[in-house]
Amino acid sequence: MLAVSASQLMAARYQMALSLGFHIVLSCFGVAFPALIYIVHRRGIRGDADALVLAKRWSKVAAVLFAVGAVSGTVLSFEMGLLWPGLMSRFGDVIGLPFAMEGIAFFVEAIFLGIYLYGWDRLSPKTHLRTLIPMMVSGVVGTFCIVAVNAWMNSPSGFRIVGDGTDFTVTDVQPWTAMFNNAVWLQFLHMFVAAYMVVGFVVAAVYAGGLLKGRRDRLHRMGFTTAFAVATVAAVIQPMIGHVAGMRLAEHQPTKLAAMELATTTERNAPLNLGGILIDGKVYGAIRIPGLSSFLSRGWFNRDVPGLDVAPTADQPPANVVHNSFQIMVGIGTALVLFSLWFWWRRRRQHDALTSRRFLKLAVIAGPAAVLALESGWTTTEVGRQPWIVQDVLRVKDAVTPNGGIWISFSVILIVYAGLGTITYRVIRSMSRRWRDNGQIDLPTPYGPPAEHAPVPAEVS
């Protein structure tokens, strides 16, 4: 195998991180947005004109995001082979099945998205509504398949290795065993709920921004409360899933857990480190809460939390990155739970939080905060596995391409994604401006609201 420079390896990592970080946000909308559209569309065909307006407009936004996601997803599929031939050449047969099934799910979702968009003035109300169901199912299947690959990288199974070191052969491949590895279900649930959390808070943030600008019509209030309700359910469920998922790390990925907890040595009744940084094997600046790390990560106070000393230095992940990304994820997630519950508590007490500028400003911030929590969670997952691309089997440096020019491809990808992001924002903002300025329902269905009784909505971007 040709030697790979540290610079080349870093370029490959940066390019993959950029591609994954960009695509994962779009994939969340592919998973959760159809469900939000289903909620308002179902309400709309029961006689709510504003809900039908939301369904029509959200479906157009979904189409734009889906198209951009198709581009970024295609880039990712090429990068897996071009950047990491050491992984795909050895383990392509092991993880090929979920990749193939995700491709089928993607095309099914694309087909039914097209039918849904085309069917506004051509299908009966109930039939039209039902075309969203295959989209939601495809989102579930696609998410499971992609997460199954990542879970396999964290908990490899379904194969046998012949040989030693980096010169080995993979035999006895069992694709179904690899796909349904022992990490997949919790990791899938964690990501699936995260998608609804992100989409819910981002959509709610858009309507909170409109309400801040004085667009206090029923359309904006419904758009906010529908999305915020979905986000609240996801935000409340997510910590429980994350807690159970984290508890398995002590046995299966102890060094990742040690990095997350910033634990330098294995310790019983281990303290929880809030903040802090690891320098030369010592933790500085952390707030230590006695026993809480053992309780949260192992289920009780008198249990051991593994330290970084369980592995040689060469096998340890960059603890500061893992620890701080984990704490950002947990901190934001906790804040979003409290913020969501506070809104519904005030609503139950007949207080209209949507008239409070302070609340609306916080709701606007909640959208990008949820995205940051998502990115931080994936940083924890991926960086916490380092230096392995397949846990305890194949190192990242042994999987990267020996070919040069990665910094050039990284620069090209950076420009492409910057352009895609800018174009996406401008297109959606232009759509929003036309909806607001023209004051049209733009819903030519036989069961839509009569134009003479339709409200004059104002959509925000």
Image (cartoon, rainbow, N blue to C red):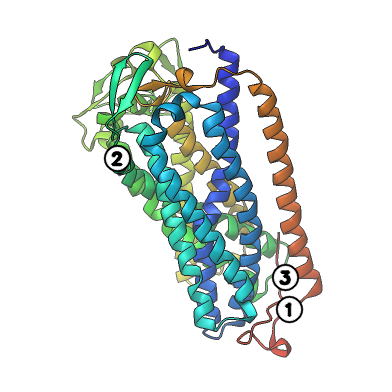
- Residue hosting label 3: 458
Specify the amino acid type for callout 3: Ala
Dot 2: element: loop
- Residue hosting label 2: 181
Q: Is residue 221 visible?
A: no
Relative depth, front residue between 341 and 18: 18
Is there a contact, CB below 8 Å, between mark 3 and mark 1? yes
Per the model, the C-alpha gap separating discs 2 and 3 is 48 Å
Residue at 54 percent of width and 44 percent of height: 24
Q: Quadrant of residue 380?
A: top left
Q: Is residue 409 visible?
A: yes
Q: Is residue 285 above or below residue 45?
A: above
Dot 3: element: loop
Specify the amino acid type for callout 1: Val
- Badge 2 crowding class, 10 Å Cα cut-off, few under 14, some 14 to 19, many 20 or more, is many
- Residue hosting label 1: 456
